[in-house]
């Protein structure tokens, strides 16, 4: 009996312990199970685009905006600041983003100037004839020949001089009776540069001379020859121009935008293409008081001693001038590539890094002068802050698409993220609309002809960009700038003149610093506004003899979209080249 009772108690305790262990190991309430399910679902992997972080998908695939492969979203990548855009380190690498720590600068602006060696105009002399008559013999035969002062350069037969010699002989015979007559005739010959020795020879021989020599007044090199053998001369007529090349000028071109930084007395270091590895220096002695109305440049003069005639006129030179643009106080500067500006405001992106990840946030800054490849920052940044130096457009595009504050929208707000090939366009300010007026305007055949080289260079520029060929694209842009500067504005008459002046101003602005572009990305940034002008000009002037096509890519220009002009109906994208060669559509045909 007692044994049975103990057995029952033992069995009951064993059962209770078993139930408790089962509940702990395998069980749980229905609420706990629901919570566990929620926790499990919250750990589902999320996929995003490295270029467009606002894209979130529960499974791998392609980005609906750019078509790139989606990547897993890293844990802890949520935005800490609602106005900041987050980006993983791998996404930064793919987007080509690098940063720069803001620091002080010495405030020295470096300006590159192109120029060439010219004749020192102060040493140019025009050798003239003091004797009227016919050239019987000429002693200087070609440009570049050296003549020495006192050298005979030509012999001249002069009927007037022959008559004056006869008068001299006759006046000498009555010298005792009429001395004033003799002196008068003698002075007449001296005015023709006939020497005393020659006059005495005529008197002593009693015979007239047929030819008289012309002597070089100065030494130098002939730079222009004006007469040939047998030519008839008037008194004072120029035989040739001569220059002393012991000193020369190096004339540097100053763009209108750099005019305020270049002063008389500035030191300039320069190189000459003919002497690789050598560097020369000089001081600006004179600056043109006028700007060339066609090229919009003035010239700065450096006077150079030319021992041994080392420098030859027309040699090309490249100079560098440094000038202080701020006072002695410390000044902040950032790379030019870090700044985005709309004309009204300038912005940079500040990098913040915490244990939760990396974020970028827009900040408006006030720009000072451009120092080479750096901008002075007057307001908006502090020493030590880290900003985006390269890839700023990619960060801004991500901010726009994510509805965060961006260059075009400081307040933020969602934008359309689809790959839209429709007719949507960015708002344009009134000044830009005026500059790109495309109302039909009649121009002359001469004006149309003057525009043809411009279109030829533009299409070569576009074709080189489609092939990702930086060297050919830059060469085409420089040729475009040269063709543009050669166009004579006087061929545009009436209303077309005003329209052309608007186009000219805009093109000049876009090609002003073409020589300084260092990569294909900058070329594509320049291509977009130039294309807008070329499209407007084609619609306004109708200068082409064949149809042209306005084509559009919505992903260009930091996802704001960009147009270009093409001779072919087929889309070949110049903004992305091989990476997205077929992206875009034909929006309009200009017949």
Image (spheres, helix red, strand yellow):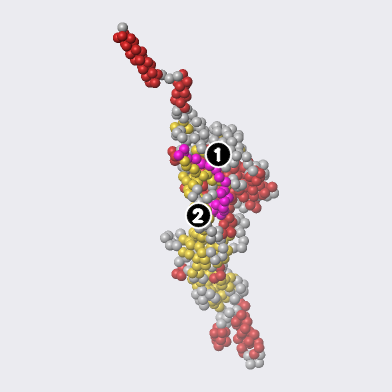
Q: State the extent of the magenta-drawn residues as a range.
A: 355-380
Determine whether 590 is above or below 302 in the image. above
Determine whether 209 is above or below 438 in the image. below
What residue would you read off at disc 1? Answer: 83
- Does dot 2 land on a helix, a strand or a loop? strand
Instruction: Give the residue furthest to the right.
Output: 494
Q: Quadrant of residue 171?
A: bottom right
Q: Residues within 10 Å of mark 2 (few under 14, many from 20)?
A: some
Q: Position of residue 3 (x, y in %)?
A: 30, 9
Queried whether the magenta region covers residue 29, the answer comes back as no
Looking at the image, which residue is at 51% across and 37% down?
80
Between the C-alphas of marks 1 and 2, the distance is 28 Å
Q: Is residue 23 visible?
A: yes
Q: Position of residue 87 (x, y in %)?
A: 48, 38
Predominant secondary structure in magenta? strand
Q: Answer with mark 1 or mark 2, whichever residue precedes in sequence.
A: 1
């Amino acid at each position: 009996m007692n044994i049975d009772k103990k057995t029952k108690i033992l069995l009951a305790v064993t059962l209770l312990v078993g139930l408790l262990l089962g509940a702990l190991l395998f069980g749980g309430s229905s609420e706990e199970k629901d919570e566990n399910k929620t926790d499990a679902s919250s750990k589902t992997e999320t996929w995003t685009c490295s270029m467009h972080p606002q894209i979130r998908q529960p499974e791998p695939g392609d980005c609906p905006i750019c078509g790139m492969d989606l990547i897993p979203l890293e844990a802890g990548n949520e935005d800490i600041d609602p106005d900041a855009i987050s980006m993983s380190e791998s996404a930064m690498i793919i987007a080509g983003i690098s940063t720069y720590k803001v620091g002080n600068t010495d405030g020295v602006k470096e300006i590159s100037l192109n120029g060439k060696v010219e004749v020192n105009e102060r040493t140019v002399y025009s050798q003239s004839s003091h004797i009227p008559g016919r050239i019987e013999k000429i002693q200087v035969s070609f440009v570049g020949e050296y003549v020495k002062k006192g050298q005979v350069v030509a012999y001249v037969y002069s009927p007037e001089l022959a008559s004056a010699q006869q008068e001299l002989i006759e006046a000498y015979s009555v010298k005792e009776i009429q001395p004033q007559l003799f002196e008068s005739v003698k002075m007449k010959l001296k005015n023709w540069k006939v020497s005393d020795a020659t006059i005495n020879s005529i008197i002593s021989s009693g015979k007239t001379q047929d030819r008289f020599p012309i002597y070089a007044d100065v030494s130098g090199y002939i730079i222009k020859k004006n007469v040939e053998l047998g030519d008839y001369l008037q008194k004072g007529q120029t035989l040739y121009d001569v220059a002393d090349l012991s000193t020369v000028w190096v004339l540097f071109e100053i763009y209108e935008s750099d005019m305020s930084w270049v002063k008389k007395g500035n030191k300039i270091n320069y190189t000459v293409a003919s002497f690789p590895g050598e560097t020369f220096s000089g001081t600006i002695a004179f600056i043109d008081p006028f700007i060339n109305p066609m090229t919009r440049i003035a010239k700065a003069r450096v006077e150079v001693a030319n021992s041994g005639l080392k420098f030859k006129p027309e040699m090309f030179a490249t100079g560098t001038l440094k000038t202080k643009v701020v006072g002695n106080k410390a000044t902040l500067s950032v790379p030019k590539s870090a700044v985005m500006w709309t004309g009204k405001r300038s912005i940079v992106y500040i990098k913040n890094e915490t244990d939760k990840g990396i974020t970028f946030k827009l900040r408006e800054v006030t720009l000072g002068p451009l120092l080479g490849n750096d901008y002075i920052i007057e307001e908006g940044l502090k020493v030590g802050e880290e900003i985006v130096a390269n890839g700023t457009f990619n960060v801004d595009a991500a901010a726009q698409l994510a509805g965060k504050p961006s260059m075009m929208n400081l307040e933020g707000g969602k934008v359309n993220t689809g790959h839209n090939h429709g007719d949507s366009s960015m708002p344009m300010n009134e000044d830009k609309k005026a500059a790109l007026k495309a109302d039909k305007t009649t121009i002359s055949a001469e004006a149309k002809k003057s525009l043809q080289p411009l279109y030829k260079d533009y299409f070569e520029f576009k074709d080189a960009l489609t092939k990702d060929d930086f060297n050919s694209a830059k060469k085409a842009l420089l040729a475009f700038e040269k063709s543009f500067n050669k166009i004579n504005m006087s061929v545009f008459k009436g209303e077309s003149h005003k329209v052309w002046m608007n186009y000219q101003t805009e093109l000049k602005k876009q090609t002003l610093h073409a020589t300084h572009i260092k990569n294909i990305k900058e070329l594509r940034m320049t291509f977009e506004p130039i294309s807008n002008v070329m499209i407007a000009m084609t619609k306004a002037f109708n200068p082409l003899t064949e149809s042209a096509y306005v084509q559009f890519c919505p992903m260009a220009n930091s996802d704001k979209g960009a147009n270009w002009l093409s001779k072919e109906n087929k889309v070949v994208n110049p903004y992305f080249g091989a990476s997205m060669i077929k992206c875009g559509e034909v929006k309009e045909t200009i017949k």
